[in-house]
Amino acid sequence: DAGITQSPRHKVTETGTPVTLRCHQTENHRYMYWYRQDPGHGLRLIHYSYGVKDTDKGEVSDGYSVSRSKTEDFLLTLESATSSQTSVYFCAISESLAGGPGEQYFGPGTRLTVT
Amino acid sequence: SQQGEEDPQALSIQEGENATMNCSYKTSINNLQWYRQNSGRGLVHLILIRSNEREKHSGRLRVTLDTSKKSSSLLITASRAADTASYFCATDRGSSYKLIFGSGTRLLVRP
């Protein structure tokens, strides 16, 4: 398995509280991604990073922020958690290929429940 | 909105049979990728096919790409119970580093 870990693996939190999820890689890959996976929606991109301190929004970024101060760490913060953010969150890493994105390696996921 | 859409949404076959899943997309791509997800786990990359390729093989997997129809298919031959999983296609919409995933096909292989 690619060296990618997520923490915590499970979290239950209350509506309105801030939550931070961590993704850590040991592969020195340039690109890092945060997705959420919900039944019926597949995998949706929240935010991604193309280098240290370089991040951009994905398709479902509202209510989320990210930071990448080191190559190996990519943090996802839910500024004020809502029940609609109950989901499974996956981090992924990749390198680009000539002419397109390379394969992505996924972490084990974080199951977040907002009550 | 989803870029790739898989069809069918669910597929149930007997062990030993072949499984075919299809993916359609809407915009030009650099490459198309297929991933597998076992229940409760992260996605695992299966195969990448570039826009200038028409067919690619990896073990029991065969992927085809028809850019004129904006569609791809994944064929798993001689299926096994261990192939039971969800399968996703992902396209890049011309991006160099971003993928958009479809909602997947759930495959059940009955022993």
Image (cartoon, coloured by chain):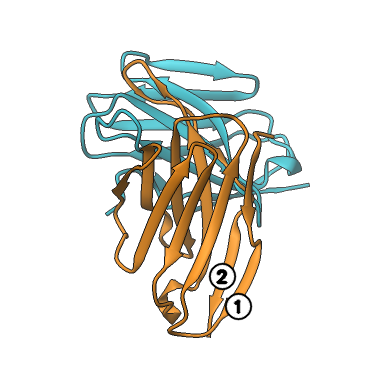
Chain colours: A orange, B cyan
Give the spatial CA distance, label 1 vs label 2: 6 Å
Q: Earlier in the sequence, mark 1 or mark 2?
A: 1
Question: Please, what is the three-letter code of the amino acid marked with disc 2?
Answer: Leu
Which chain is disc 1 placed on? A
Question: Please, what is the three-letter code of the amino acid marked with disc 1?
Answer: Val
CB atoms of marks 1 and 2 within 8 Å: yes
Which chain is disc 2 placed on? A
B10 left or right of B91?
Answer: right
- Identity of the residue furthest to the front in this view: A69
A59 left or right of B36?
Answer: left
- Residue at the (53%, 53%) spot, across then down: A90
Instruction: Give the class, few, some or many, for how many residues have Cα within 10 Å of label 2's Cα (few <14, many ≥20).
Output: many
Mark carried by residue A112: 2
Mark carried by residue A12: 1
Q: In the rendered image, which quarter contains the N terminus of chain A? A: top right
Query: Up-down: is B56 above or below A102?
Result: above
- Residue at the (28%, 39%) spot, across then down: B25
Can residue A43 be seen here? The reply is yes
- Residue at the (41%, 60%) spot, across then down: A41
